[in-house]
Amino acid sequence: MSTPIKPGGEYRGDFLEVDAMLDDEERLIRDTVRAFVADRVLPDIADWFAQGTIPVELAKEMGAMGLLGMHLNGYGTAGTNAVSYGLACRELEAGDSGVRSFVSVQGSLAMYPIWAFGSEEQKQQWLPPMASGEIIGCFGLTEPDAGSDPRAMKTSARQDGSDWVIDGTKMWITNGGIAGVAIIWAHTENGIRGFIVPTDTPGFSTNDIRHKMSLRASVTSELVMDGVRVPEDAILPDVVGLKGPLSCLNEARLGIVFGSTGAARACYEAALSYSKERVQFGKPIGSFQLTQRKLVEMMVKVNQASLLALHLGRKRDAGTLTAQQVSFGKMVNVRSALEVAREARSVLGANGITLEYPVIRHMNNLESVYTYEGTNEIHTLVLGEAITGISAFQ
């Protein structure tokens, strides 16, 4: 007789032992971030979620760990590979999507454009304090009337002497109300350009979005620019057009591909533990066929998502990953994570809607992750164009 596979391998959520394919440095990063989440996030995350807040001091703690802009090179960053960045995102999102979103926005949306398209002076000025968490950044692309269609943005920048004057409004901006610098994308007479805008610049203001039922442990804001004047050297010199902001989003989406597996794993593990402890009709509910089917479906989705994330991470490190493949990963893994969260909620019954357990918090968060940085529908159409050669956008 063959020896049965023990579900979990090193961890209960890793039935296929996907983590066995990691190298020693990747495992160390995984374990370090997992320990940080267990120590600094999980004990208080339910309260942060309920209160709609996140401690700003976490930024410097994560900066000291090398998590901010960790997949970039130089300027105080850790210079890790893409898989390590993904693993960090996975462990952070196993804690909460809001914590992972902070790291994704800081590193991939605020630091990356400076690193990829900025001048050497801009890199020297901004990247080291952002890597340490001393300066928090945000990314201003989405507007009240321009979400999936960024070309429709109304924010504009015009030259006035040697300065640029920016006017417009950005919406749903993670970190906006706590940021010290914003990367603002605006129409100019020469195309869409990116600007590095200190948030204490006159005319720049923020309004935090209240009454959210998702991503509550995250600051989400409106950015208002009314005659914001910045010097000529605030413009990112090495990119023109939507290639700039879309390449940043592609960087961040890889973190979501991994991060969503962390949320799914947390929900699955909560349901698995609960099913062994909750007794009905004289025995644990995990002994019933319908519950076991739910647990198996969750486990399969978690492991499929983990395999996909690792595969895409390896392709990113090999330089062979395409934007369409990132869309594949973001669409599939977030959708699977949301399905896992909903199934886990049903296993926990009424307890599944309380913050005593992580499931409803993850489920609510994933509703936002399903939509942001490219809705499920947009990624579907990206893949549709990839396989047919026909664009459905125009």
Image (cartoon, rainbow, N blue to C red):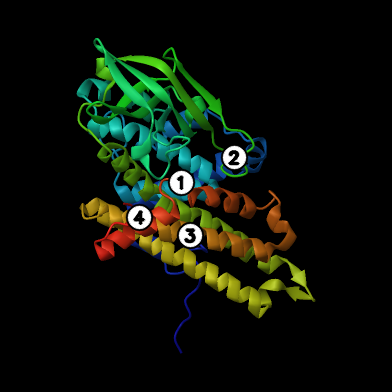
Label 3: how many Cα within 10 Å (few below 14, some 14–19, many 20+): some
* Type of the residue with mark 4: Ser
For image coordinates 41% across by 57% down, the residue present is 331
77 versus 319 height, above or below: above
Q: Mark 1 = which residue?
A: 372
Q: Position of residue 341 (x, y in %)?
A: 58, 59
Which mark, residue 2?
none
* Type of the residue with mark 2: Arg
Q: Mark 4 = which residue?
A: 327
Mark 1 vs mark 2, foreground winner is 1
Q: Earlier in the sequence, mark 1 or mark 4?
A: 4
Q: Position of residue 122 (x, y in %)?
A: 26, 22
Task: Judge left or right: residue 208 versus residue 66.
Answer: right
92 versus 168 height, above or below: below
Q: CA distance from mark 3 to mark 4?
A: 12 Å
Q: Earlier in the sequence, mark 3 or mark 2?
A: 2
391 versus 111 height, above or below: below
Can residue 108 be seen here? The reply is: no
Q: Position of residue 244 (x, y in %)?
A: 27, 37
Q: Mark 2 = which residue?
A: 216
